[in-house]
Amino acid sequence: MIWHFWETGFLIHDNVEFDFYFIRHGESQSNITPGIAAGVNFDAPMTDRGHKQAEAAGTRLGNEGVKFDKIYSSSLVRAVQTTEGVLKGMGIPDTDFERVDAIIEKQTPGWRGKLAKDVMPTEVRLLMAEKGKYFKAADGETMRWVERRASNWLEDEILYNPDWYQKDGTHTLAIVSHGDTMRALLHYITGIDNRLAMRTDIFNCSISRFRFGKLGWSIGSINDSSHTLALGDIVRDEKIVQGGLGV
């Protein structure tokens, strides 16, 4: 017997492709507090510059003619504010978007408001480097947990959701999230070494593009932040090493 995959339903992505725009939130109050391990307010709002970054990202997307089929935002306020700013910059401020708990930032309650030098001495940093995504700080999440909740949502809501297959062609989607959550998804998508993923720059309001179709994932760009050059970025300007390992 000759099997035709398209007749047996095996090639579920044969007729659709997803064009993802992963956008990190704009600069938040926690981002500009020097030396802390985690923001004292896990739901910190954006700064004035963060709002400008978000609108700049939206203006760029609008000028490029990008039209989103659906927009998802982390439910944390800085991501929601970013999404609103992007839509304003695109000239479509009244567009609806979905708030998603599964793509919020990595949570480490025990480290909130504490200095990195106090909670991450050398021995802790070495353990972080050794255990990688399985390192768990006090009552916090591991990067593996963040990857699991975010990737499970991505698969259930989009990649393997049959509702998307009803319309052939490319579905263009925006996902507004956070630095470590996006690094976890970068690891999930690419299989990149976790330590390298954690050191990957994801600037405020940067855009990372990935496509998913019948042949799986492909990379368009990572950390494209040319639209915020004139506004500045706390990480880029202060030469901060991202990812918290420092070893």
Image (cartoon, rainbow, N blue to C red):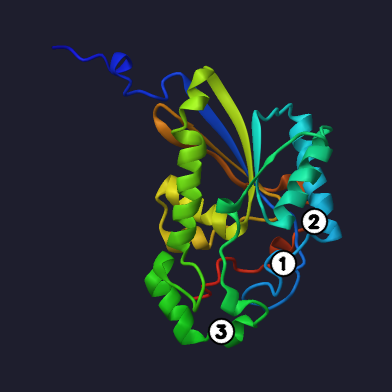
Residue 98 falls in image quadrant = top right
The circle drawn on residue 50 is 2
Q: Earlier in the sequence, mark 3 or mark 1?
A: 1
Q: Is residue 217 above or below residue 202?
A: above
**Viewer-side residue, 247 vs 67:** 67
Q: Secondary structure at mark 2?
A: helix
x and y, in percent, of residue 157 in the image: 51, 38
Q: Secondary structure at mark 1?
A: loop
> What's under tag 3, amino acid-wise?
Val
In the displayed structure image, the side of residue 30 where residue 135 appears, left or right: left
> What's under tag 1, amino acid-wise?
Asn
The circle drawn on residue 31 is 1
Residue at image position (53%, 63%) is 199
x and y, in percent, of residue 3 in the image: 21, 15
Q: Earlier in the sequence, mark 1 or mark 2?
A: 1
Residue of label 3? 119
Real-space Cα distance between discs 1 and 2? Answer: 10 Å
> Within 10 Å of the Cα at label 3, are there few (<14), some (14-19), or many (20+) other Cα atoms?
some
Real-space Cα distance between discs 3 and 2? Answer: 28 Å
> What's under tag 2, amino acid-wise?
Gly
Q: Quadrant of the N terminus?
A: top left
> Within 10 Å of the Cα at label 1, are there few (<14), some (14-19), or many (20+) other Cα atoms?
many
